[in-house]
Amino acid sequence: MPIRIDNELPAKQSLELENIFVMSNKRADTQDIRPLDIIILNLMPTKIETETQILRLLSNTPLQVNVELLQVATHKPKNTSQEHMLKFYKTFDEVKQNKYDGMIITGAPLADFEYEEVDFWDEICTIFEWTKTNVYSTMHICWGAFAGLYYHYGINYHRLPKKRFGVYPHYSLDNTHPLMRGLDDIFYVPQSRELELSMGDIAKVKDLQVISYSDEAGIHIISDMECRNFFVTGHSEYDRDTLAKEYFRDINKGLDIDKPLNYFPNDDINLVPKMTWKGSANLIFSNWLNYFVYQKTPYDLNDLNKK
């Protein structure tokens, strides 16, 4: 899948070095096909790293994807330059009249705050509501998933006694669900969170289905019955070294944190971690794009809510 992005976006060079097909706007404009329009609300502090991770996973089908990056206007990032944000990111006011085939809402390091305490909570609630009419299928990741479930269904989190941190075995609870297509009986997913969801809370909502699970890490992916919304607790998009960076960052801060589980070979922090989740990550994202964005979205996005 060619990814259409700004030619000067920092992620472009990294992706090209990995032989991922990145298409410039000039070349894409000569294509006589209907591309998919995807918008990414990036709430992570490491904006450029997260951009690269997600764009990598959106590149794995033969479809052309137009990608736009969205920021919340009510919060100024501390770890990414204002120049980068102004150049590559739009605000909600700039896109609210648009319609999109798909949207990704990332995680954010906000587990210490109640939702209403988050400085951009009102704005993200506006965006959640807007997705009902302007986006066909939305994938919510980690904090984005917890916040989305709280907003759309009133489902709150349960706080873990200790951070769930590592790479955990998962399995499908519905092998017929298209999002699970091609996955191994056991597949691995990085987790890095202090919150969890209850199967009992999900079971009370008829519109929701848990489609993948881990005996060690709990609920992984929840789908609504129309497959217009997916809520994902894990981080399939993570790079090989992302958990290591988080671990060493917290160690350097003097925080009490365990080594990520099932991550460093022989549990030795001096060894390079094995990446055991790349295949499942690519499948999950390509299945989402193919089955729930490309095949179900109307050709004319003005007809989005007639489906």
Image (cartoon, rainbow, N blue to C red):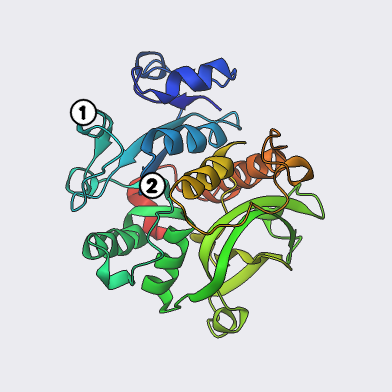
Mark number for residue 271?
A: none
Give the residue drawn at x 49%, y 21%. 14
Most foreground residue, 170 or 246: 246
Residue 265 lies, in percent from the top left, at: 76, 41
Q: Which residue is mark 1?
A: 83
Q: Label 2 amino acid? A: Met
Give the residue drawn at x 72%, y 42%. 268
- On screen, residue 267 versus residue 161, left or right, reads right
Residue 68 lies, in percent from the top left, at: 34, 36
- On screen, residue 236 versus residue 255, left or right, reads right
Residue 4 visible here: yes
- On screen, residue 86 versus residue 178, left or right, reads left
Q: Label 1 amino acid? A: Glu
**Label 2: which secondary element:** loop
Q: Which residue is mark 2?
A: 44
Farthest right residue in view: 185
Give the residue drawn at x 27%, y 45%. 71
